[in-house]
Amino acid sequence: MGSLYICGTPIGNLEDSTYRLKKILGTVNLILCEDTRRAKKLFDYLQIDTPYESFFIGNEYKKNSKIISRIKSGESIALISDAGMPTISDPGSSLIEGAVKENIDIVVIPGPSSVVASFSITGFLSTEFTFYGFLEKQGVRRLKQVKEITRSKRPSIFYTSPQRLKRDLNEINDEGSSQEIVICRELTKMHETIYRGRASTLIKEFQQKDLKGEVTVVVNGATQAIVEEDDIIKASMILMKGSSSKKSIAKALSQVSQYSVNEIYFMIQDY
């Protein structure tokens, strides 16, 4: 029986390739790659002439049984993604699941990861984080994710596109986020750029920018509790029964929440 190799590849800079990666890719019988055109650039750089074929979200389930059969017959096969570690928001998990059931030897060849790389340069004082991959595009699940990110005590990391970044920041800001955010664009590449700031300031900064490339966002853990609007209203109703003015209520509650005096006054003006 052969082996299945899960190989990490550079996230941008081909010089981050390891000797072990070159050795494995040069000795296996077949390389499965997410995009054959992008993979060809890596193979040319490493001077690899191993046969390769596409393996992406659209065809992975169709190919799994055939790949496992080839490994069981004695061939060794390597799996790579376009960049970073396979199965991290990339295809491959179902193939590995099938290989485990068949008692196939699975070997990992560690490599770069934009998740770890981006978290390592934040300076956030935390030993743990939550990784979301790509956020949902819309709906209740997306709203739930954004709420979790703005309220979590641990940092949150997610992938996004330049086209979706402004929307992501606006929704995080709308949820009352005040924590530090680090945005990593084109990590390890020639035009690598790191942006730091709160959602409100980053929104203004990106208004005049037309971003391109791969983007990873790291949102620091919340340093203060996010107070829900319903709770503000409930507290205000209680205080109004005690004859407190709306202006004084708004001023007091602004001191213990993420809302300004004017925002709270607007919430309770009809009560």
Image (cartoon, helix red, strand yellow):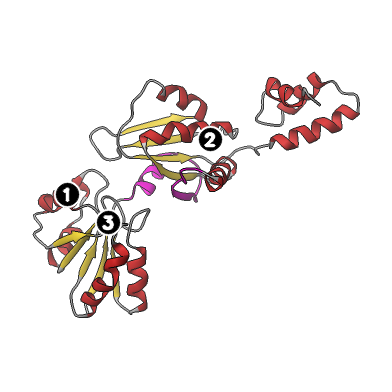
Q: The disc labelled 3 sits on which kind of residue?
A: Gly
Q: Position of residue 99 (x, y in %)?
A: 32, 73
Residue at image mark 1? 37
Q: Position of residue 124 (x, y in %)?
A: 48, 40
Label 3 sits on a secondary structure element that is loop
Q: The disc labelled 1 sits on which kind of residue?
A: Arg
Quadrant for residue 69, please give it: bottom left
Q: Residue at x 24, y 38 (%)?
A: 189
Quadrant for residue 190, please give it: top left
Magenta stretch, residue numbers: 113-138
* 6 versus 268 height, above or below: below
So how many labels did they put on this image?
A: 3
Residue at image mark 2? 172
Q: Position of residue 164 (x, y in %)?
A: 41, 36
Cα distance in 3D space between marks 2 and 1: 36 Å
Label 1 sits on a secondary structure element that is helix
Precedes in sequence: disc 2 or disc 1: 1
Precedes in sequence: disc 1 or disc 3: 3
- Magenta stretch: residue 135 in it? yes
Q: Position of residue 2 (x, y in %)?
A: 21, 76
Quadrant for residue 79, please give it: bottom left
The residue carrying pointer 3 sits among few (fewer than 14), some (14 to 19) or many (20 or more) residues within 10 Å by Cα, namely: many
Residue at image mark 3? 8
Residue projecting furthest to the right: 242
**Is the Cβ of the residue at disc 2 closer than 8 Å to that at disc 3?**
no
Cα distance in 3D space between marks 2 and 3: 31 Å
